[in-house]
Amino acid sequence: MADNTASVRALRLGVAGPVGTGKSSLIATICRALAGELRLGVITNDIYTDEDARFLRSAGVLEPERIRAVETGACPHTAIRDDITANLLAAEDLERDFSPLDVVLIESGGDNLTATFSPALVDAQLFVLDVAGGGDVARKGGPGIGRADLLVVNKTDLAPYVGVDVPEMVADALLAREGRPVLALSRSDADSVAELRLWVLGMLEAHRRGTHVPQDPGPMAPHFHADEEHPDGGYVHSHAEDADTHPHPHAGASHGH
């Protein structure tokens, strides 16, 4: 690594998504792809256990000491967004103990479509869906789907077995995200893993250059409402983001069809 990167705090990359979408295996994939060229650390979140951390240690993707667990004792969303103290301290401890690190991956406990990280905790965030959750999930929207820095449609190798059209799911996701990046991923597909690797490296470079500004996906991202009478089967509901114009988000909501 170049000497001028040593003084830059590690990129903190959040990984969120519903239960069972493959967040831990995604982190393992990132570690396998990048451990040979970057200095990595991992923090996992579980309510009462360190199971995800133990899975990653047993997978041998990093030195065990570089993988640490936070037991939240409460809703996983709370520990990554509302009271980030435990995760922030864990990240700072990890970076101090293994200084310098390039990237710290922070995995949320399994939550729902509203799970997002506070920008005070992470610099960028991935939101993970999987094809087994249904091809319609991507168009349902929500803050994670709509505004995370990258949306990953995971486990694409399972699509034939669950009746999901991956290109259609990706197209729905791109529409819900207004063109923000979407990656169809399988850990057994080398091309998609290579795309993921390049995305992480690009985000790290932007972080080091100071050109990436952490964003708050917020709780009011566009989301899909089903409506049988609508020609498209429903419509996207989006809330105004200008706090000066709409000081009360619910009362000041606007509808885009």
Image (spheres, helix red, strand yellow):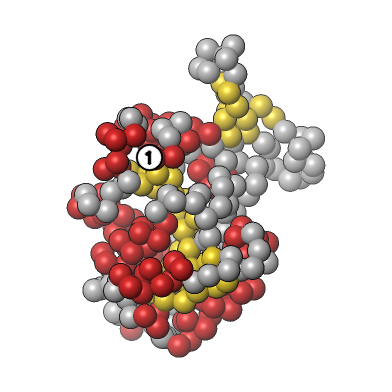
Q: Nearer the viewer, residue 32 or 146?
A: 32
Residue 217 rendering spot, x and y as whole percentages:
58, 50
Asked whether, in this view, residue 46 is left or right of residue 74, the answer is left
Name the quarter where the N terminus is drawn. bottom left
Which image quadrant is residue 216 in? Answer: bottom right
Q: Vertically, is 114 above or below 223?
A: below
Q: Residue at x 35, y 59 (%)?
A: 25
Q: Residue at x 46, y 31 (%)?
A: 136
Residue 66 rendering spot, x and y as whole percentages:
40, 79
Q: Nearer the viewer, residue 135 or 84?
A: 135
Q: Residues within 10 Å of mark 1 (few under 14, many from 20)?
A: many
- The residue carrying mark 1 is 131
Residue type beneath disc 1: Val
Residue 51 rendering spot, x and y as whole percentages:
46, 68
Which image quadrant is residue 175 in? Answer: top left
Q: Residue at x 40, y 61 (%)?
A: 24
- Residue 59 appears in the rendering: yes
Q: Nearer the viewer, residue 101 or 185?
A: 185
Under circle 1, the secondary element is: helix
